[in-house]
Image (cartoon, rainbow, N blue to C red):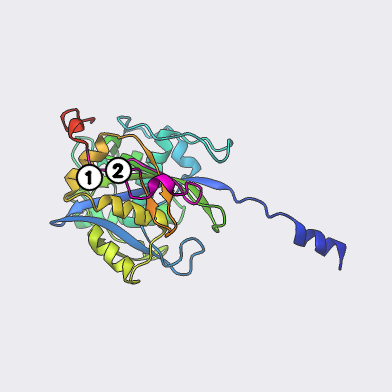
Amino acid sequence: MDLQKMDLENKTPEPLPVRPAATVLLIDDRPDLKVFIMKRNPKHVFGPGMWVFPGGAVDSADHHKDFSTLRHNHQTVDNTNLINSDIITTDLAYQIAAIREVFEEAGILIAAYDQAGNPLSLLETEQTTRFQRHRDAVNDNSANFRQIINTEKLQLNLSKLHYIARWITPVGATRRFDARFFIALMPSNQTADHDNNELIQSDWLSPASILSKHSGGELQLMAPTLRMIQSLAKFKTASQAIDAAAHNQTKQRVRVNQHNDILLPGDTGWETADENIETGWIKLRPLDAQLTTNKVS
């Protein structure tokens, strides 16, 4: 055997870089609790054909502090670095990335307000057309999201975005992310739609419906998405879920049992389950009775 070929065959593969990322559960009462979920293009390398929440990697521009109308009333995001000490991502960068990704993939500008402090409305034809041009420009990299926010003189009220989980893609995946999950209420005067490129289908579905479709093989979910839907299913209304998220509860480490179910403390079998299969922490769960009297805004 050729020695060079043998060396290549025996070489240990280089570990994939783990990129910081942000994902958003966009929820609404329609009239019962629904979550916006989209199907990824089957031609894509990462998660082909999977149903996902809007989200993606943190970009270098998301670290930029020059959001002239930014309102810094936001929750602290877990920045403990477990994977790569070279990755340093701020609370602000994760939250900007989350808002940007929802705009790119779903056409929604969450937490956005005009100069007078009114929620951004994108229902009139002129506004819809103008912001669709902005969205197209961000998606084809001909414009910068920060510049659009500043040009439109929008305020980003980050208190409308709540940090609820952290998931790290296991070794072996084609791409790896260290993702922060957020939850936000759907703006009442905007309309969500997939980008028809990276995402090819979208819908507002109840957690129960998603779980049923997944169980029947009609809808494919990655393990973290499934676990987040299971957590969301414990709530009856969007306001209940947002209220629980706003309390910024302590994180709980997930474990996986022999049936590959992702468990949280309190779930049957959690004590003996494995915590090395999936790396994730979840903060979203119903409020304890004592917390309801001490709401965290």
Residue matched to label 1: 241
What is the C-alpha distance between the residues marked 2 and 1? 8 Å
The location of residue 287, given as percent across then percent down, is: 22, 38
Which residues make up the magenta segment? 265-287
Residue drawn at 35 percent across, 53 percent down:
227
Residue drawn at 20 percent across, 49 percent down:
235
Is the C-beta separation of discs 2 and 1 under 8 Å?
Answer: yes
Q: In this orientation, which residue lies closer to the viewer: 271 or 138?
A: 271
Which numbered disc flags the more N-terminal residue, 2 or 1? 1
Say if the magenta span includes residue 158. no
Q: Quadrant of residue 95?
A: top left
- Position of the C terminus, as image quadrant, is top left
Residue drawn at 34 percent across, 48 percent down:
24
Residue matched to label 2: 284
The location of residue 161, given as percent across then percent down, is: 29, 40
Few, some or many residues within 10 Å of mark 2 (<14, 14–19, 20+): many
Work out whether 5 lies above or below 229: below
Which disc number belongs to residue 101? none
Residue drawn at 17 percent across, 44 percent down:
239
- Residue 103 makes an appearance in the image: no
User: Hey, what amino acid is under mark 1?
Assistant: Ala
* SS class, disc 2: loop
The location of residue 158, given as percent across then percent down, is: 30, 36
Question: Going by the picture, which residue comes out furthest to the top?
Answer: 294
- Position of the N terminus, as image quadrant, is bottom right
The location of residue 4, given as percent across then percent down, is: 84, 61
Work out whether 99 lies above or below 88: below
User: Hey, what amino acid is under mark 2?
Assistant: Leu
- Residue 74 makes an appearance in the image: yes
Say if the magenta span includes residue 277. yes
